[in-house]
Image (cartoon, rainbow, N blue to C red):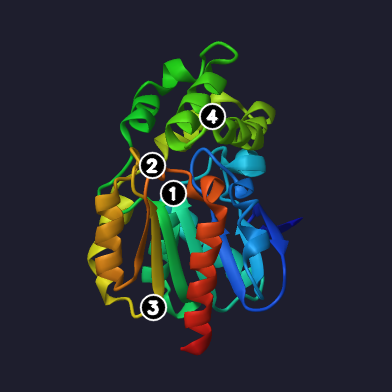
Amino acid sequence: MQTHTARVEDITMRWEETGSGDPVILIHGIPTCPALWRDVAPLIRNRRVLAWEMPGYGASIPEGRDRDISVGTQADYLVAWMRAQGIHRAILAGHDLGGGVAQIAAVRHPEMVSGLFLTNAICYDSWPVPLVSAVAATGSITQHAPDGALRQLLKMMFSKGHETEAAADAALAAHMPHYEAHDGAEAFVRQTQSLNVEDTKAISDRLSTLNIPARVAWGAADEFQKIEYGERLARDLNAPLRRIEGGLHFTPEDHPQIIAEEINALAETVAGA
């Protein structure tokens, strides 16, 4: 994947790209970055794959300073970036917060979304999870925590969300350096305090009106985003649900083959529509 940047609406936006063809846009969540999709993107066939980085996250953490980085506003940033890149229509694939961004973008701009893939995504009233809410509530304390405290917190999140410690360690190695390079705990607090469940609740009753091909894949043992929410999304989107038995939260890192299979299947459906 090659890293690209562009100035869009006075924001330096960053994404990683590979392949050619009709676009698939991959959207990460918290506390991750486009590297979440590092093992998925190479398995997506015959498509231009763009892993977009939300402003305020990953290497773009500095762009979140003194700026609205809520999920609802991220959907606006995504659409502005798509238009700036000349992408008129794309499959959106989202995990965690990125799934919320994808849902909101699809509801607001259905003409720009050819397909919707969601995996262990925020939705309805499923979020923020207690750990993230606790960080947001104690932000003034958390952001001044001793060096190493954020690393231990993120390690705990990754350990609870991955099936093996090796996978959790690999995730920490992929995502932690961005926090260490940019604002540390202050950045994580800023991210958590931007989260507002009303962003997904506001569009939840419109999901069932979307006439967009969709697929859902869900780690069935996820403690952060329960399988019941995946089942509800599948019903509302009239989409097949692939249950990953024993799967936890970070499915793109634990099960890249399954996630890529589902995106490829969606792409075939879109191409045949």
Residue 124 visible in the picture? no
Please provide percent x and percent y for residue 95. Answer: 46, 52
Residue on which disc 3 sits: 212
Residue on which disc 4 sits: 165
Q: Which type of secondary structure does the marked residue at label 2 adopt?
A: loop
- Whichever of callouts 4 and 2 sits on the residue coming sooner in the sequence is 4
* Circle 4/circle 2 CB separation < 8 Å: no
Q: Which mark is residue 97?
A: 1
Nearer the observer, disc 2 or disc 3? 3
* Circle 1/circle 2 CB separation < 8 Å: yes
Determine whether 118 is above or below 181 in the image.
Answer: below
Q: Which type of secondary structure does the marked residue at label 4 adopt?
A: helix
Q: Which type of secondary structure does the marked residue at label 3 adopt?
A: loop
**Label 4 CA crowd tier, 10 Å (few <14, some 14–19, many 20+):** some
Q: Residue 202: which quarter of the image?
A: bottom left
Q: Is residue 258 left or right of residue 183?
A: left
Tell me the distance, in whole angstroms, between the alpha carbons under discs 2 and 3.
26 Å
Please provide percent x and percent y for residue 214. Answer: 40, 72
Residue 138 versus residue 248: which sits nearer the camera? 248
Q: Residue at x 43, y 73 (%)?
A: 109
Please provide percent x and percent y for residue 136. Answer: 38, 29
Tell me the distance, in whole angstroms, between the alpha carbons under discs 1 and 4.
23 Å
Amino acid carrying mark 3 in the image = Ile
- Whichever of callouts 1 and 4 sits on the residue coming sooner in the sequence is 1
Tell me the distance, in whole angstroms, between the alpha carbons under discs 1 and 2.
9 Å
* Circle 1/circle 4 CB separation < 8 Å: no
**Label 1 CA crowd tier, 10 Å (few <14, some 14–19, many 20+):** many
Residue on which disc 2 sits: 195
